[in-house]
Amino acid sequence: MRKTFIAAAITIALASITDAKVFDLFNSQTIYWENDNFGIGRKSDRFYTNGVKVTMGLTPSEWPSLSARAQTFRIDFCKKTPLCSPNQPVESLSVVFGQNFYTPQDITIPTPQPNDRPWAGWLYTGLALAIVDAPQKVQNTFEVQLGILGPGAGAGATQTYIHKDLGFSNHIPAGWHNQLKNEPTLNVIYKHARRYGNNTRDIVPEGGVALGTVQT
């Protein structure tokens, strides 16, 4: 009953947003959900146990100032580096929202576990810029993320809901009061990807660099 109510509430909320034409500001929406239960073989909450990320592409005509700056950045970047494709690269801007959390292997122990990964939640938002050529063979992605690490990220409530209310696990987390304290976070990420193959079979190797406070 509770799940049905939640699904109905989400549907009504999305419908009201659509009626308000807020979605005109965005031209695409993508939701990523990663969870240890989706893996094959032995399941464990240890290390990285859950992550949700929502990416919403900005409609250029609705964000003229941001779009103009993105275009200028793309032109300068492609002129000064050999990382862009000569095949008519274009830029696209997106806003991102996400929440990750990390736990020790045994989440039922309420006391601190200094020899395992600490309890940590991370809530963030940011802006992403993708530069892609017309054949979609080369992509450069830049992303800036601002967020909070600690109780303010709400990870304890999220994991309890996933395990207890959604029935993902019989193990109810008991140690979130030991999590890392609140602190602001800043991440800057760059990724470069190239696609080899055709529309039937392809391979996409990628590499990049991330600078910021979250990994420390």
Image (cartoon, rainbow, N blue to C red):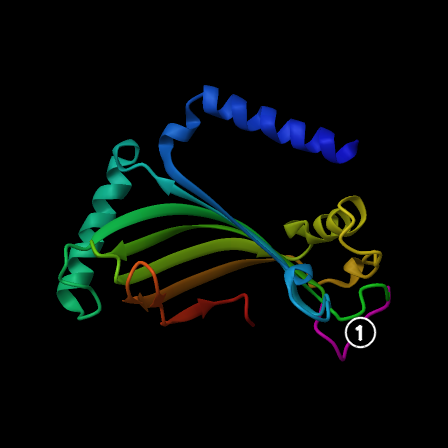
Q: Which is more toward the observer, 164 or 149?
A: 164
Mark 1 — residue?
Answer: 113
Vertical order, 77 against 99 (above or below): below
Residue 130 x %, y %: 31, 54
Q: Is residue 99 left or right of residue 26?
A: right
Tell me the element at label 1. loop
Q: Amino acid at mark 1?
A: Gln
Hey, which quadrant is residue 141 in on the image? bottom left
Q: Which is more toward the observer, 155 or 177?
A: 155
Q: Is residue 83 left or right of residue 93?
A: left
Residue at the image point whose x is 24% and y is 36% from the top: 64
Give the residue furthest to the top: 19
Q: On the rendered image, what quadrant is the N terminus found in? A: top right
- Whether 131 is among the magenta residues is no
Vertical order, 60 against 12 (above or below): below
Vertical order, 23 against 69 (above or below): above
Residue 10 x %, y %: 61, 31
Hey, which quadrant is residue 85 in on the image? bottom left
Residue at the image point whose x is 14% and y is 59% from the top: 87
> Magenta stretch: dominant SS?
loop
Q: Is residue 55 left or right of residue 25?
A: right
Which region of the structure is painted magenta? 110-118
Q: On the rendered image, what quadrant is the C terminus found in? A: bottom right
Residue 107 x %, y %: 80, 64
